[in-house]
Image (cartoon, rainbow, N blue to C red):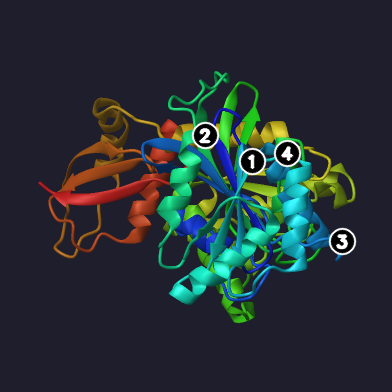
Amino acid sequence: MPKSEFTVSLVGRPNVGKSTLFNRITGKRRSITYGDPGVTRDLVSLPAEHDGRRFRLVDTGGYLSGERGDILSKVRGQVLRAIYESDAVIFLVDARDGVLPLDKEIVTMLREREKRFFLAANKVDTREGQEMAAQFHELSVDTVYPVSAEHGTGVADLLDAIVPLIPEIPPEDTGTAEVVARVSVLGRPNVGKSTLVNTLVGYERLIASEIPGTTRDAVDVLVQYGDKRYQFIDTAGIRAKRKTETVLEKFSVIKSLDALRRCDVAVLMMDGPEGLSHQDKQILRYILLEERAVVVAANKADLWAGEEKRRQGIRTIQEELGYASFAAVVPTDAVRGKGIPLLFKKIEEAFGSFRKRVSTSSLNRMVAPLLYTVPIPSRKGRNRPFYITQVGVMPPSFTLFVKDREGIPDSYTRYLQNKIRDRFGFKGSPIRIVYRER
């Protein structure tokens, strides 16, 4: 979480409506909301604004005390980190449940850390609910803010109380680096996506576990590398549709695909020694359909038996990429941080290609001989090309003006893409070609 922003964290027991309130305040459905408790695990943060004041809102997992297993103890650690890094806390309780022992524990914990907090009693939709909210004065708080996160009632009053704490002019960011690219890390469950992002930021920002399906939300994390900053998006593992059993799993996959649409560069993370699986290829198809720049991270490279096996494994993966053969394959070891410099080099290269422009004159000097040497297929006989020009970036997009655009096969488009790539590079980036009649 950037230190230059006023930060407000949402804290409370599981299933009190934190994610619903988070989505309500930010105006975006970024956090997954579901009826079962414990859906949110990692910290999800977004910028928010109220009454002209901007701040960053952080959604946290449900707070549970004591040792309750590896993942739940890590969730608790994430909540404590969010509280520590926040300027204020919204402590959310469930008016329908009344005051529970865990609520008392959380309020004691907040006071021990001398953290300014605002107690909001959620699920207050009726006059009876207003009366139920009043019982939380038992926690020795001056004001209880009755709200309905689902319907939005009372939320403005809660934010009105927080706004005076927010500086009118946000402190200047002392960092000189600008965000360079948005990078989504995608892959099957348990290939090391969260471990990679944790290694990049230098601490356990995301909950990583050997249990598949640990990550559920798509989580944005700011990563500084050298003098540049990158917005990494960790995503839930994408399993084959036939293996996606629960509604929650389907929500997680939807969030992962949404993260793909928001990014500039997609890092397809796979298990290198296992090779490119059918599901890896399916995820690669999703990336190609969204026309995003791509880098393949062959993780767990330490498990290859020797350097020669590693080189042969990388060559095999490269050959199996098919239409995405323009993507670089980088061997990585996310746990030990090996391969990270090369990974960033290839991300930079792919992002540069994603935004690259070529002049019309350069294009036509290169392409014109090819267009007249290799006839353009057409259903109406000989097809005549006129000229080609680049019309956009992200992805690089070209328009070829022809006599007849009907019936030009995909094979010719791929031929032209390859020739453009051979001449101008565009490593790591897809190329879009459309045909227009003059």
The location of residue 237, given as percent across then percent down, is: 65, 63
Question: Amino acid under label 4?
Answer: Glu
Secondary element at image label 3:
loop
Residue plotted at (86% across, 65% down): 69
Residue nearer the viewer, 370 or 151: 151
* In the rendered image, the vertical position of residue 43 relative to residue 349, given as above or below: below
Marks 1 and 2 sit apart, C-alpha to C-alpha, by 10 Å
Question: Amino acid under label 3?
Answer: Gly
Q: Can you identify the residue that label 2 sits on?
A: 165
Marks 3 and 1 sit apart, C-alpha to C-alpha, by 24 Å
The location of residue 236, given as percent across then percent down, is: 63, 61
The location of residue 351, given as percent across then percent down, is: 49, 36
Q: Residues within 10 Å of mark 1 (few under 14, many from 20)?
A: some
Marks 2 and 3 sit apart, C-alpha to C-alpha, by 33 Å
Residue 207 appears left or right of 249: right
The location of residue 121, given as percent across then percent down, is: 56, 63
Q: Residues within 10 Å of mark 4 (few under 14, many from 20)?
A: few
Asked if marks 1 and 2 touch (Cβ < 8 Å), the reply is yes
Residue nearer the viewer, 341 or 209: 209
- Residue 313 appears in the rendering: no
Q: Can you identify the residue that label 3 sits on?
A: 66
Q: Can you identify the residue that label 4 sits on?
A: 114
For marks 3 and 1, the one nearer the N-term is: 3
